[in-house]
Image: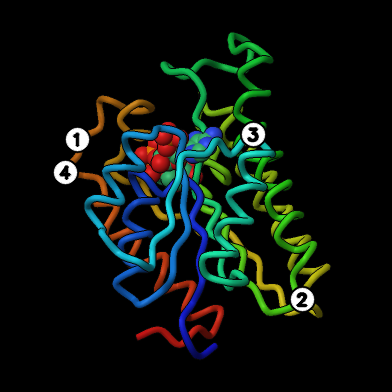
Amino acid sequence: MEGRINAIVTGGTCGLGKALVKTLLKNGCNVATFGRRPDLVRTLIEEVGNASLFAESCDLTNLEQVSSFLRKATIAFGAQDLIILNAGELGPTPLKSVKENSILYFRLVFETNFFSNVWLIKEVLGGRKSPIAIVHVTSDSASNAYAGWGAYSSSKIAMDHLLRIIQAEERVNMVTAFSLDPGDMDTEMHRRALPEDNPDSLKKPEDAAGEVLAEIWKRCGFNVR
Ligand SMILES: NC(=O)c1ccc[n+]([C@@H]2O[C@H](COP(=O)([O-])OP(=O)(O)OC[C@H]3O[C@@H](n4cnc5c(N)ncnc54)[C@H](OP(=O)(O)O)[C@@H]3O)[C@@H](O)[C@H]2O)c1
């Protein structure tokens, strides 16, 4: 694809999402993003100071807010070429076994990591007339059975499989859909999940963002400067 890429990154106000937003902007893309905490949205806008960024406070699990965000993003930059489903919910920490964890927490995690993403994808695919790439940020815990990671990991593997089904259903409609694992990164989520891990042994979100985007450019044939 030639020309300026219009991207949406969910949860682009800290961690990997923020690094993705900054790298996309450096690559000359238009980027629309959101997170719940308004202070983090303000900080991102201040740090970037770029007319190619649209950012606002929005909760992925609030369908009205997401719908309004998508409308504004389209008004700002036009139809989207790339959606990165990055926002993720770990659930309460310390992580608990399936037996000990409340069903409410399973629902909370699935609401963010699965149902809200399904809804966002349906909204985007519904009115679309041009090619689009949908990339889900997954985790190695989706394919490895780590004790305590029941809700998060099952929501990630459910989403991974859904993306494969969307790819099968929509390939003829110029949709590319897949999941990518960024690896273990030094972020807020990782610090909550595994506070004992040495940050020096973890990837910097900026490095992970570079790797994730390189893979997206390669698989989707985007021509990025
Ligand atoms: N860190 C790792 O080692 C690791 C490894 C493999 C995969 N991943 C995946 O990588 C992705 C990014 O993780 P991260 O480590 O960068 O996490 P993070 O530091 O916790 O950042 C998550 C981002 O998503 C936003 N967010 C979370 N829930 C949201 C909601 N309901 N609505 C809107 N925004 C929401 C957060 O902002 P607010 O809280 O203000 O909403 C924040 O901007 C996640 O999908 C995670 O599962 C992480």
Quickly name the residue at label 2: 171
Q: Which residue is more in the foreground, 79 or 186?
A: 79
Q: Which of marks 3 and 1 is nearer the N terminus?
A: 3
At label 3, which amino acid type do we have? Answer: Asn
Q: Which mark is residue 198?
A: 1
Please report contact status of discs 1 and 4: CB closer than 8 Å, yes or no.
Answer: yes
- Label 4 environment density (alpha carbons within 10 Å; few <14, some 14–19, many ≥20): few
Q: Which residue is more in the foreground, 95 or 116?
A: 116
Q: Does the residue labelled 3 lie within 8 Å of ligand 1?
A: yes
At label 1, which amino acid type do we have? Answer: Asn
Q: Earlier in the sequence, mark 2 or mark 3?
A: 3
At label 4, which amino acid type do we have? Answer: Asp
Helix, strand or loop status at disc 4: helix
How much space separates mark 3 and mark 1, taking CA atoms? 35 Å
Q: Which residue is more in the foreground, 206 or 7?
A: 7
Helix, strand or loop status at disc 3: loop
Helix, strand or loop status at disc 2: helix
Q: Does the residue labelled 4 lie within 8 Å of ligand 1?
A: no
Q: Which residue is more in the foreground, 134 or 61?
A: 61
